[in-house]
Image (spheres, rainbow, N blue to C red):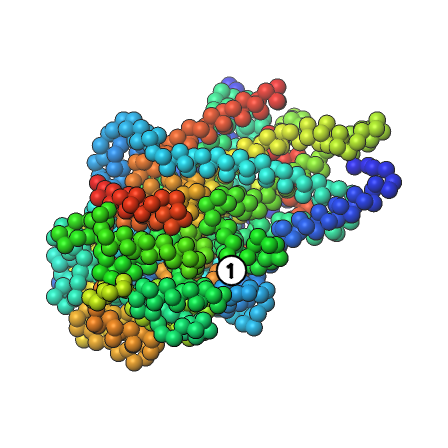
Amino acid sequence: MNQLLGKRTAPYRYLAPTLILMIIFLVIPIFNVVRYSFVDKAIVRDDPEFVGLDNYRTLVADDSFWNATGNTVIFVIVSVVAHLVIGMCFAMLLNSNYFKTRTKTVARVFYILPWVFTASVVAILWKLMLQPSGIVNYLLSVLPQISQSTEWLSNREVALAVICFINIWCGYPFYMISILAGLQGISEDLYESAAIEGATPIKSFIHITIPQLQPILISIAMLDFIWTLQSFNVVWMLTGGGPVESTEMLSIYIYKLAFQKVDYSMASTAATLLLIVCVFIAIFYVRQQKKVRD
Amino acid sequence: MGMVGRNKFSTKIIASILLVLGAIFAAFPILWMVCSSLKANSAIFAWPPKFIDETASLNSYFAVLSDSVKLRFFLNSYIVAGAVVVVTLFVGILAAYAFSRFDFPGKGIFNSLIISVQAIPPIVLLIPYMGMIVAMGLFNTYWALILTYLVTTLPYCILMMTGYFNTLSKELDEAVMIDGGSRWKALWSVLVPISIPGMVSVGMYTFMQAWNEYLFALALTQTTEMRTVPIGINLLMGQHAYDWSQMMAMSVLGSIPVLILFIFFQKYFIAGMSSGGVKG
Amino acid sequence: MKLKTILRLCLMAGIMAIMAVALAGCGGGSSDSGEGEEAAADNSGTTLKFQQWWGAELPEGYLDEIVANFEAESGIKVELLTAPWADTKTAITAGAANNTIADIVSVDGAWLAEFVDMGILTDIEAAGVDTSIVGDYWKVDGTGYVVPVNNFAYPMYCNMDILEEAGVDAIPTTWSELLDACEKIKAAGKQAFALNLGTTNANGIQNVYGGTGWASGITLKNEDGAYEVADNEGQMELAEFFKEMYDKGYLYEGMATLEEAEMTSNFAAGNCAFTIASAATMSQFTDVNFETALIPSKDGYDGEHGICYASWAVGISEACENKEAAAQFINYLLSGADGDVSAGLAATMSAFPNSTVANPDYSEAPEQFQSFYELYKENYVINEYIGLPNASDVMTNMTNDLVKYLEGEIEATEMLTNWQGYLDEAGK
């Protein structure tokens, strides 16, 4: 009898610490945040007024919100795709047979460097490098279009692209490592038998490498998507959402609402919408994984 | 990837070029960071910019290392990050074991929950969260930060370790249990030792997260003795002027231990993430 | 295998033990604010918490010394809490929402309205701050909440080496002289004039743009105190002046994301001819041959120059449990040691004291500051953004529109109409 009881509750017992921690420290605050989105003047007043869906209506009518959403979508998609592509390139380089092990080890250390530094300092570093009288313009000034006055981050048209580039630079090491590990898990036999059958390297890449890596790629793509949605520090220190809101992400939009305008209700509203989107993605992912395993 | 004869040579050239270009792409800004940390503050904006100029000195590094306040920041960050890694791994492994070895009602829901809570922007969470910490009397202590980072790094840890355990056959557990051991024993004496590579990779990621976090560290600590390195770096950003070279110096100093850890654990790290969780 | 498990458990236990010790031994101060052992009339034995960013800008240990002297005199201990300047407002609002706010908080002009609205600050006169000895204190709806300690004026810094190289003989005093000078400087291949329109901290519109306006008597408000920007001829002229500078390429590149810190560091490196920045930054410009001057005024304007200023100001939090002690400390800052505390703070930071009993000894200050001091005495200080509700948001919006206008996307009339809208809507 005891054993049966133990068996049934076993998973819950193992899960208990996690659940307790997450309920206390995440679920309750999140619940509060959702609650704030339904009231007006949350936190600043002791007795906020319930306003139903008003905040949501105001939010959806705000042009800045859609601007931020648009920028975020571009930023996230470009970042995720590039992280995977660059990560894949570097991983394949590091996994290939062309180099000695020591070269590869040294290269690995080089390639991981962007990940090791604090985000805010990296942002300031890039800001210094990209300013009109900075090192980037100096080195590129051999090209006719570039001079001491070329603007990167302060030019509305290219600012978003530059931010994407910097974010890609900051984040690719993590994906490179994940893909590299995955590549090392693919058995050499598969490639050998493909080569024997006359497959070109490109074909074996498409038909062996990608399918084998698919679970990894989907997993880290989803994680990257969620993490990049939240990304705040790098963009804030680089441009603060400027120039003229051309690099304003949802995270910056929310920050400004919460701490510049001190309007926690609206900030909570935007955050709740973001959360709902991610919940859908998460459910979708979990269902996918279940299918794959069964 | 096998290829025939002469083609091998030219592809090797291309690959080598790519390797070097990649290294420049990755390391050039870091090189600039180190150069900037060696310059005097006013030289940082000089035109034309030079890599090493007349003002080059280790002054910024001395300033950071001789300041006991700043050293305390490093100590605090290490304590917090180290504790977070230990507790995250412990709690995460338990949860991952549950997800990997059992099928139970609510499994899918918990899984989705754990993944999706990562999506809430920390900015909005700050004030309600802080309210709880204050109510618990943990304000301005290490535990405030440890618990905070714990809940943000747990999801990833669980995801990874679950996938890792999934690749380890259930027969391993059964072998222990047939011998009369409990599940607990199976977990800690068999599964965990094999999973060390996975744990190392999760540990490194967790350490980085705890080390770099700024907003909650700012809000949950109040006195200077409890501050961490990211705040220390931001304190160098004054109202009208920044101390650029000290900022760079502090960042370089902060990253050296992480880099050393990475080099040391490299072999685990790579092997770790392979059969590791990302396969789901 | 067994040994391994034991070792692992020991390791974990050891780590837990260390953490427990760390928690017990090194855990920082509790979250009580201002609890005293005796609520005696003399308040000694109380500990106050002072949230500020000044400590990092003053010389090492300066603020600690002031605090130590105060403790010796009154028995009240003041604990200094420092947060980075850019996040002090966040720290204060988060603290207010959770009852961990300090007793005395330093307040920037742009935050005043929001703090009062949130009920964070308390009436300083009621608490006992002596407002008769100060030149000015900040009120909202008739109640005084914040008193400035140091006022920083914003002169225009001129790099004399660049001027000489470009063949500019004298520091320009009118707009047309400024345009001429910029033309020559540009021809000599240098950067002429810096305008910081970055929005991480949108104060360029106040310090530089607003400062240039106030120097010619161009204000946001009319005589009745209402915002009048849309049909304001002066504002139109100001806008067109900056547009001319932009079109002719006199404005320093990268203005749309330029922040004050970069602007001053750029000037310190000797790259830019004219920069309008706080007097407090003067100590950075050790390698530059520079002079301070008033911002050039409109051609034909001969009235007094309004000089932009910012302050280091303090208020008492509503949650403070011992407001009299807090007021005592503020009074000390203003008039302690016969005004020497305030005088010292002012002289050290190249600022002007708000306290009327302080007589700073500027002989140790940079000579450029002393020459500016003479100019300052002949004119007046003004900053229309202090106390503006939702100031950061309004300034950011105004800045965005200014960038659009300068880059030619909208017309001046549209920009001014938008500004009128922002100012009228502020705080509603």
- Give the residue furthest to the right: B5
Which residue corresponds to the image point at 45% horizontal and 57% vertical from the top-left? Answer: C253
Q: Where is residue C274 in the image (x, y as percent from the top left)?
A: 39, 66
Q: Disc 1: which chain?
A: A
Which residue corresponds to the image point at 87% horizontal and 40% vertical from the top-left? Answer: B5
Disc tally is 1
Nearest the viewer among C246 and A9 is C246
- SS class, disc 1: loop
Taking the image as shown, residue A201 lies to the left or right of residue A165, namely right
Q: Quarter of the image for the C terminus of chain C: give it.
A: top left
State the residue position of label 1: A133
Which residue corresponds to the image point at 49% horizontal and 20% vertical from the top-left? Answer: B105
Q: How crowded is mark 1: few (under 14 residues within 10 Å), some or many (20 or more)?
A: many
Residue C402's place in the image compared with B56, above or below, is above
Q: Position of residue B144 (x, y in %)?
A: 40, 46
Residue type at tag 1 = Ser
